[in-house]
Amino acid sequence: MTPSAAELLASATAQLAPDPRANRLVPLIARGEASRETLATLALEQQWVIAADQRSFAHLAERAAGTPAAAAFFTSLAEGETLAGEHLTAFAAASGVTGQRTRSYTPRPGCQAYPAYVSWLALNACPADAILALTANFSAWGGCCARIADGLRRHYDFPDEACAFFDFFAEPDPDLDTWATSAVEAALDTGRLNETAAHQYGRLLQAYEAMFWATLGQPA
């Protein structure tokens, strides 16, 4: 019996879940043991990531115009990145990032591999395959954000405004789940879902996500 779209999404999320021991930085932030400089670097790198992902998701929305659910999924992601960018400003300020430092900052290659690959997906992947891969990755990212938001409040005395960036990603979006399921279902019905490719994309996304955190944890 062919798995349903919901079953495929749940299976991909479970299979592509990262090893919790692989990310050493998020637990440090959660315990208040990461330096303020590390938080500042996280903010600076995210400024680059958010801008790149917003454009990538907008492009995927255009490519998925013939499939309403897929287009809605990517449009929502693009709009979410815009909102997240606004929240990021407060986190950056609380971390001590100034406008001058933002302008002069050189991003780390290991941190920017993830958005570079999302851009590759925007150009090359079938939208439904990208949805399957991204949905699996978002689950892990949301969990990291929840732990960071808690750590910032408990140990760094960051106000809610400075934690809003992480709160935003930590909160599940039921509309995204609905659109993802409908888009994958439509691709299944028309034979346009390549599950093997989607899992390959998802594994690479998780690898680049792990690279992001590992790079942040290294000295400049």
Image: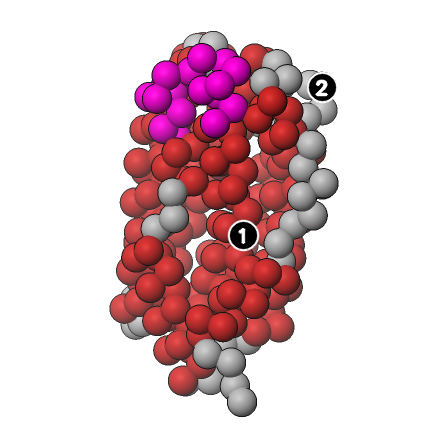
Task: Pinpoint residue 115: horizontal percent, then vertical percent.
Answer: 53, 43
In the current view of this chain or complex, which residue is farthest to the front? Answer: 154
Question: Is the residue marked by circle 2 packed among few (<14), some (14-19), or many (20+) residues within 10 Å?
Answer: few
Which element type, helix, strand or loop, lies under badge 1? helix
Q: Which residue is mark 1?
A: 137
Height in image: 119 above or below 99?
below
69 displayed left or right of 147: left
Where residue 167 sits, quadrant-wise, is top left
Which element type, helix, strand or loop, lies under badge 2? loop
Question: Is the residue marked by circle 1 packed among few (<14), some (14-19), or many (20+) residues within 10 Å?
Answer: many
Task: Pinpoint residue 151: horizontal percent, then vertical percent.
Answer: 52, 24
Q: Which residue is mark 2?
A: 219
User: Could you tell me if residue 175 is visible in this image?
Assistant: yes
In the current view of this chain or complex, which residue is farthest to the bottom? Answer: 1
Residue at horizontal 56 percent and vertical 13 percent from the top: 36
User: Quick check: is 163 in the magenta stretch?
Assistant: yes
Give the magenta range: 150-165
Please tell me which residue lies in front, 84 or 21: 21
Please tell me which residue lies in front, 177 or 31: 31
